[in-house]
Amino acid sequence: MMPYVVREALRAFRRTPLLAGLSAGMIGLSLFLVGLFGIAAYNIRRVLERVESRVEVIAYLRDDAIAELVTTAQQQIGEYPEVREVIYITKEAALLKARRELPEFETLFGGLDANPLPASLEVMMRPNQSGPEAVEAVAARIRQYPFVDDVRYGSEWLDKVYLLRRVAGTATVVLGISFALVASLIIGAAIRMAIYARRDEIAIMRLVGATEDFVRRPFLIEGLLTGLGGGVLALGVTWLAFAIISRSVFRLEFMPGTWTLIGVIAGSGLGVLASAVAVRRHLHEV
């Protein structure tokens, strides 16, 4: 047999289906927007992980660099915790690579007798670094070697990639909180109407000895079911939007299962919290 609190919560949905649907819809909308930005943030993170796996710090060496010192530096740099691998590129190897990868190189420098390219150390970073600061720190340490002429690692685009990830994460949080507040107000209004619709029944329950917790439980269950419905609705709409964008615009990866589960749980928790606040404010008025 269905418990009393669940039956009463379902009866409340039947009494005010429009308001209940609006409450669930607002939770669904707030979580849907959070989900969209969550997909964006997750895909930016995935792109960033792939970029990080190819991040290189290039140390260009002076022409008078002593081979033994370069070999020692190569070993020392390879022991940095942030570094995955260090490759020494000779002047001749750099010239062959430029001729192979840059067709215009021959046009510009083909007539020169001397090799204009310097030797270099290509430092491959480990993935999942804490940010561009880790790359900058490695570059700064490499610059301290006296035979290093210049160090490059694309700091401008690396900073922009990390900035984009921070912006996406911040926008997700701000929009989620804003719409969650609106959804809470609507849920609170729905609970208040349900309380006043049942004020005679609540008064009788109190006369026969019902505790305040017993009176509150149906309204909390109502909020829980509203939030759960909003979370499931948001999950479905988010998946639909993801599928449309992924097929018609560009390929995306959907959020991990833990993220979606947290979203549904957050919707349920938001419904319970909004109901608890509304019950506490309005139950003593009847």
Image (tube, rainbow, N blue to C red):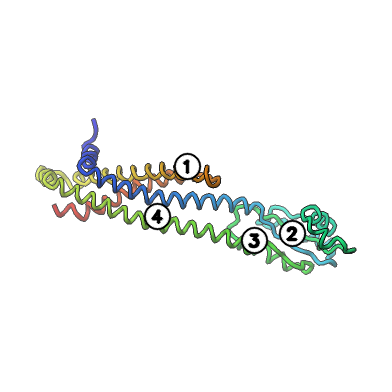
Query: Which circle's residue, 1 or 2, is located before the other in the chain?
Result: 2
* 264 and 101: which is toward the camera: 101
Q: Residues within 10 Å of mark 1 (few under 14, many from 20)?
A: few
In the rendered structure, the answer to whether residue 118 lies left or right of residue 49 reads: right
How much space separates mark 4 and mark 3, taking CA atoms? 33 Å
> Residue 239: percent from the left, percent from the top?
45, 42
SS of the residue under disc 1? helix
Label placed on residue 257: 1
Image height of 20 relative to 99, above or below:
above
SS of the residue under disc 4? helix
> Residue 53: percent from the left, percent from the top?
65, 51
How much space separates mark 2 and mark 4, taking CA atoms? 47 Å
The residue identified by callout 2 is 76
The residue identified by callout 3 is 135
User: Are the residues at dot 1 and dot 4 in contact (C-beta closer than 8 Å)?
Assistant: no
How much space separates mark 1 and mark 4, taking CA atoms? 19 Å
Q: Nearer the viewer, mark 2 or mark 4?
A: 4
Query: Which circle's residue, 2 or 3, is located before the other in the chain?
Result: 2
Q: Residues within 10 Å of mark 2 (few under 14, many from 20)?
A: few
How much space separates mark 3 and mark 1, taking CA atoms? 31 Å
In the rendered structure, the answer to whether residue 189 lies left or right of residue 266 reads: left
The residue identified by callout 4 is 176
